Image (cartoon, rainbow, N blue to C red):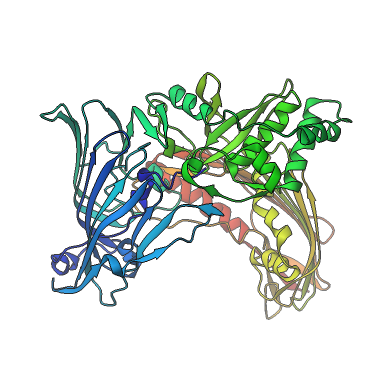
Amino acid sequence: MNHSRNPITRLLSYACLSLFTLFAQAQGVQSDLISIVQDMHTEIICKSMTQSVEKQSITITILNRKGMEDARFICRCDMFSSLQKFSGEIFNATGQSVRKIKKSNLQKSEYSGSLASDDYFYVYDCNYPSLPFTVRYEWEVKCTNGLIGYPPFLPQFSFGQRVEKASYRIELPAEQTCRYYEQYTKGKNIQVKESTGPDGQQIIEATATKLPAIEKEPFGPSFAQLFPCVHFSPSTFQYDKTVGDMSTWQKFGEWQNKLLEGRDLLTEPFRNSLHELTANCSTDREKVKAVYDYLAKNTRYVSIQLGIGGLQPIAATDVCRTGFGDCKGLSNYMRAMLKELGISSTYTAISTENERLIPDFSSPNQMNHVILHVPLPQDTLWLECTNAELPFGYVHQGIAGHDALLIEATGGRIYRLPTYPDSLNTQTIAAKVLLSPTTETRIEVNEISRLFQYEDEADIMYLEPNQKKDRIRSNINLPQADILNLQINEQKESNPSITFNYVISSNQYGNKTGNRLFIPVNVFRKGFSVPRSAKRTYPIHINYGFSDTDSIHIPLPEGYTIEGLPRPVSLQSKFGKFSSSVQVKDKEIFVTHRLLMNKGVYDPEEYTAFIDFRKQVAEQYNGTIVLRKE
């Protein structure tokens, strides 16, 4: 599902701006600034339900190399929109004009990630070598054949970007109405007001001034959860010869449901083959799995973005004939096959990026994907039809716990998908460290990852043998490590798991100083990070809850005794809990680390406690055992 043709998302791709006051403003600015939006203006004049003109200008000062992406101009066009006018100009640090940019200087590319698409792009990479500099763009886009949405007012579009002034104005004929929704604008210098023009036009204006840069913080909110935005959406619309009502999610779902009409038909020979395929299935769940496996083996995912294809699936007969489709087409094809078998299912729109839909503000750009909902008497399935490698019945990270819009005959209905408890996203590592007196070692490892942690590891199956070893090695905090005898076992079930068995060989396991050996306690948690300590502005977001258990067995090398061991630790906080135990039995050391991290959002005032918790865990993972030669 792709709304890139929608002018709402097109504005998000624009990166441009500046002014010749640059040099004065660039001196003495805070070090985290990368760019300054000097002025940005958007004006949208809707002439009817199918036609509009978007006039935009943006001026930005680029302060350092990190801000170069903000100087890039991108305009996406398609059968609904075209770039009519464009001009640009670059100014150096003293405000002198150094380059004029014409429409002929833009690169036009019809390359797309979609197999079939009517999208094309105008791009200008502003690579002026001397910093700081300012660039100004002005352009005009004409939209025809339907308006299903309007660009948002997004005055800031990068971390580390300050805004001096930005404005937005939309004007609609008297017979049209536009709704708007302010998101993350509270407490900022952003104002929105409505008025009526002399001929009854609805006019909405938004302004923003003196917006300080937003710094990206460790474990902080995502861009979409943080940056101020005003969304705009029509109450009624006309799009590619279809008419719809978007005043509520229920009404918008009615329109979406009409796009499915007549697209679930199958040929009679294929219908007969479906019944043959499921003849030996004793339950509906078995039938669904048989069809899902058939879909995985006989189709492949490609993106189809022709005409209204950004919102309407291609017909099931076409997917059956060609063997390919996008998320809409494949989900609709699966729906058609299940319908033939007497199993009801629901076409479902969802976002793989944002967990929540705005409950009382319907707009198509809030979803970017389609899945299939299959309610069974003893189980409810959420089928990801675009990835044949995902296990049947597994709800993957991109959709678990997300709001979705069920497209039913009665219209759209918001439903929240289930997710897994943090404690079930497990990884268990059992290792035996066979250490020689010269720090040469052989470590025998058994590693099992389940659910979300399985998903993080499962793509290793598609790597070359040497790449698989490199992947394992990259997660181990041990120099000069060779991975030997790697064996992988993947269990593709509704609660999937992946098991690694391998041997680590290293000539440098710890350090030898005089008659002492200093060896690491746990080399398997290299990726556990401790964020920097700094003043916190935004809430702490732990987006991923999980449980790790490490059991490490270290027989003492011949001729050595224990001189120092890490102290046992037991920690418990709202962020999670951790325990570390070290036991010695018959000249053998047994280390056990257990960590549970809780998914959640926490107050900025708790950042010090959060850092302290992670620091104490990291100290245990990075601890050292001291052995002394007898």
Look at 46% across and 22% down and name the residue there. Answer: 250
Near-viewer residue (125 or 323)? 323
In the image, farthest residue toward the bottom: 514
Can I make out residue 9 in this image? yes
Near-viewer residue (570 or 478)? 478
Near-viewer residue (194 or 537)? 194
Look at 53% across and 34% down and name the residue there. Answer: 349
Q: Which quarter of the figure has residue 92?
A: bottom left
Q: Which quarter of the figure has residue 373?
A: top right
Q: How many marks?
A: 0
Left or right: 229, with 263 as reference point: left
Q: Position of residue 332 (x, y in %)?
A: 63, 35
Q: Position of residue 18 (x, y in %)?
A: 21, 62
Can I make out residue 395 in this image? no
Q: Which quarter of the figure has residue 200?
A: top left
Q: Position of residue 70 (x, y in %)?
A: 32, 61
In the image, farthest residue toward the right: 280
In this rendering, the answer to whether 582 lies above or below 377 is below
Q: Position of residue 3 (x, y in %)?
A: 45, 44
Look at 47% across and 51% down and name the residue there. Answer: 611
In this rendering, the answer to whether 360 lies above or below 483 is above
> Where is the C terminus found, in terms of image quarters?
bottom right
